[in-house]
Amino acid sequence: MTDVTERTSEPPRLRARQRARELWHSREILWNLVRKELKVKYTASVLGAVWSLLNPVVFLAVFTFVTTVLKGGIPNYPAFLLSGLLAWNLFSVSLSNGAQSVIANANLVKKVYFPREILPLGTVGVCLVDFVLQSAVLVVFFLVSGYGFQLGAVWLYPFAFVALLLITTAFTLFVSSLNVRYRDVQHLIGLALLVWFWMTPIVYGAGTVYTSMVHSRFGITAWRIYLLNPLTWVVIGFQRALYHTPDGLKYLAPYSSGQLAIGLSMVCVIAAVAVYLCWRLFFSMSGDFAEEL
Amino acid sequence: MSGPAIEVRDVSKRFRVYREKPTSLKQRLLSGRTRADDFWALRDVSFEVAQGGTMALIGSNGSGKSTMLKVIAGILRPTEGLMRERGRIAGLIELGAGFHPELTGRENVYLNLSFLGLSRLEADAVLDDIVAFAELEDFMDTAVKFYSSGMLVRLGFACAVHVDPEIVLIDEVLAVGDEAFQARCLDKVRSFQREGRSIVIVSHALDQVRHLCDHAVMLDHGRVHAVGSPEDVVREMRLTILHHDLEFAREEGSKEVEIVGVELIHHGAPLAGAVPSGDTLTIQIDLRAIEPVEDPVVSFALHDATNAFVFGHDTASGGLELGRLQGMHRIRFDLGPIPVTGGKYWLTLGVHSRDNARVYHVQDERYSFEVQQADGRRDQLTFPVTAEMETL
């Protein structure tokens, strides 16, 4: 069977199913690019992938030390922090590297035809590998320290994970396509991520925020606005799934696992729509990447 | 399968050439309209590549041929017009696309092959062939940053020719490597042809184009300048190069002695039609010297259809002293049995001083004649042969 390809001057419109098939055919490129990125990242460094693992280990060490010295605050703080921080790392690194993904591969984009989506998707893939490695450290830490897992809450993990992946993919597609035309985006992202980080209950507890907001002048409205940040949902989902120190639960968002599952499902649906829209934007812009670079 | 492998219909490609490219939002917002000039790299280009055909895309630098190839490959989008392609395309726009210096030869092969559309399994199947073809058996586990440029090119080409597309795009890659390697590359292209793949080659090596392709398109400033058989198009290309680049005049000289008439005579009569290979031909040149000219030399040269020099001769080396020339004279070159076969030959005539210091008159390839080959013969040359037998 022969495929007939037609190309016209019309800006390409995304036909999702057909394009998805094309992407599936090109999956080998994606694997190879991810493998290449990982290898290049760690080659010529003595410790290799250990660097990736060191990040959470150092965080654990520092915060264990700091919280032991300072006392007070959220009990078992390292467990709390890492529950949300790893998710944030996946998101933020993916965004800031993803913005560069098309530009950094300019020589490929100008010389070879392949579905351009592979470049930002590859970035997400690399970050995902790091996420898995770092999560492994976390699991080992939880098991070795005797902190363990609470089976009644861990089932929430996949919900948070899928939501995280969808949100990350949508935003990465968005910034990578925009950054080709407007190089401002990469600078903007640095600042935006800084603000975003503190807008998300990673280093502090969402419960604390809730309490102070509800008692403020704006009341529950402020809290609702706070919840518009999709990453807040992801992070409080991960925290609910992993963090279970009894006297620390008041620091988590005031929702039950069931409520969070429903909330995260809704976030997933919205994020899936966002992925589609960003994909469409990326696709319609990708036809001109070779010229804009 | 029906229809041509590639159809290009009225394709135009416009590039916006920014005097100062606004790549930031601020610039774009503040400058209102962007100061850009339009540059049409391609203008209303139409051609077809037949199933299993080999087409050459030629043209001088900046004529748009690489842009055309990128449009075919899908890297660039046409600004106007339509492209239709039947079959999987592998574009060898650049050898070793995606090669990363830190990866080993083997890893790079897998990476590169995936860009060329091969799955892991397919790549496994051709890996050994590629290694052997590139002659890099001992270096596959070395990072390619330690490769010489020749090794890189060999590996890149080896990958490129081991893919299995229906349509192959080749951009000036035939001019790499040493001669032995080039010969193998050409073999590979020929085997692509035998396998019935459709090929588009961009090349500056005009002789290669002539030998490999069955069809050629010449682009000039983004427009199709000539289409047709490679012989004709290559010839057109050579002439255009002469015109454009060297400002070469088709006719020049101080004209103290002028060529006023030329006749090709075959069997005692003006040539009509083609000369059968092995026949004789006479070139008859009438000269007029307005003032007396001392000891000029008359010469002629033959070029074949691709403008390659075939043969030349002049009165001096033939031992003919013209002496002092004034008024009308007639020079005759009697060509013995013509040894070349089939094709069109172009005649350049010149009158100049013996030391070549003065050119009186040159007519560059103004006259031509065709040599016809006896049916069914495929010789490159003919020469008289007599066979004898004696009984021993």
Image (cartoon, coloured by chain):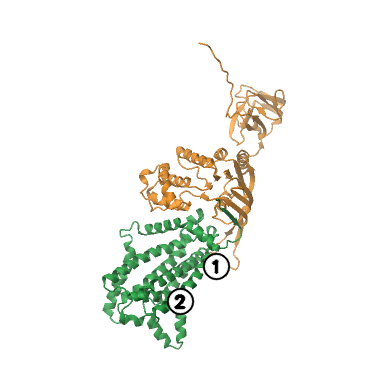
- Badge 1 element: helix
Amino acid type shown at disc 1: Gln
**Viewer-closest of A63 and A267:** A267
Q: Residues within 10 Å of mark 2 (few under 14, many from 20)?
A: few
Instruction: Determine contact: label 2, label 1, CB under 8 Å.
Output: no
**Viewer-closest of B97 and B199:** B199
Residue at x-position 30% and y-position 60% = A47
Q: Residues within 10 Å of mark 1 (few under 14, many from 20)?
A: some
**Viewer-closest of B175 and B211:** B211
* Residue A73 appearing in the image: no
The percent position of residue B366, horizontal first and vertical second, equals: 67, 35
Amino acid type shown at disc 2: Asn
In the picture, measured across the screen, residue B69 lies left or right of residue A45, that is: right
Q: Marks 2 and 1: which is nearer the front?
A: 2
In the picture, measured across the screen, residue B27 lies left or right of residue A121, that is: right
Residue B337 quadrant? top right
Q: Colour of chain A?
A: green
**Looking at the image, residue A232 lies above or below residue B179:** below
Label 2 sits on residue: A229
**Viewer-closest of B112 and A186:** B112
Label 1 sits on residue: B27
* Chain (orange): B
- Badge 2 element: loop
Residue B209 quadrant? top right
The percent position of residue A29, horizontal first and vertical second, equals: 45, 56
* Residue B341 appearing in the image: yes
**Looking at the image, residue B29 lies above or below residue B368:** below
Q: Exactly how many numbered labels are in the figure?
A: 2
Residue B211 quadrant? top right
In space, the residues marked 2 and 1 are separated at their CA atoms by 31 Å
Q: Chain of mark 1?
A: B
Q: Chain of mark 2?
A: A
